[in-house]
Amino acid sequence: MFFHVKNNLFNFFKEVNVMYKIDPELCTACGSCKEECPEDAIVEGDDFYTITDKCVDCGSCVEVCPVDAISEG
Ligand code: SF4
Ligand code: SF4
């Protein structure tokens, strides 16, 4: 029971912790953000990249995106 509650709390904070996202309309799939990410939290797609729950909210990817496709929230 304790571990069940603990896991639920962990997942809750993990989900809340994911703050950065990539706008698929703006992303040109250049790959700069993925190269910059220290946690390998960004995955490549055909038309745009996506930030996964491995993100630790460091903000490094935001600075390198040439089209400002990455934002908090
Ligand atoms: S905020 Fe940091 S950890 Fe998260 S995706 Fe961007 S570079 Fe990776
Ligand atoms: S740096 Fe910006 S444009 Fe390039 S893949 Fe990442 S989000 Fe897309």
Image: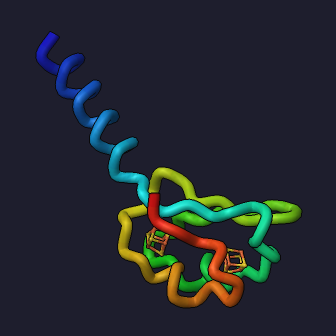
How far across and how far down the image is residue 45, in percent? 79, 61
6 to the left or right of 14: left
Give the percent coordinates (x, y) of residue 64. Answer: 58, 89
Splitting the image into 4 quarters, where does residue 29 fall? bottom right
Q: Is residue 47 above or below residue 35?
A: above
Question: What residue is drawn where x is 62% and y is 76%?
Answer: 34
Q: Which residue is drawn at 71% across and 65% down?
A: 49
In this view, the residue farthest toward the top is 1
Is residue 53 rendered to the left or right of residue 11?
Answer: right
Q: Which colour scheme is used?
A: rainbow
- The quarter of the rendered structure image containing the N terminus is top left
Which residue is depicted at the point 68% across and 63% down? Answer: 23
Q: In which quarter of the image is residue 48?
A: bottom right
Q: Position of residue 25 (x, y in %)?
A: 79, 64
Q: Position of residue 40 (x, y in %)?
A: 53, 69
Residue in view at x 45 percent, y 77 percent: 38
Quarter of the image for the C terminus: give it: bottom left
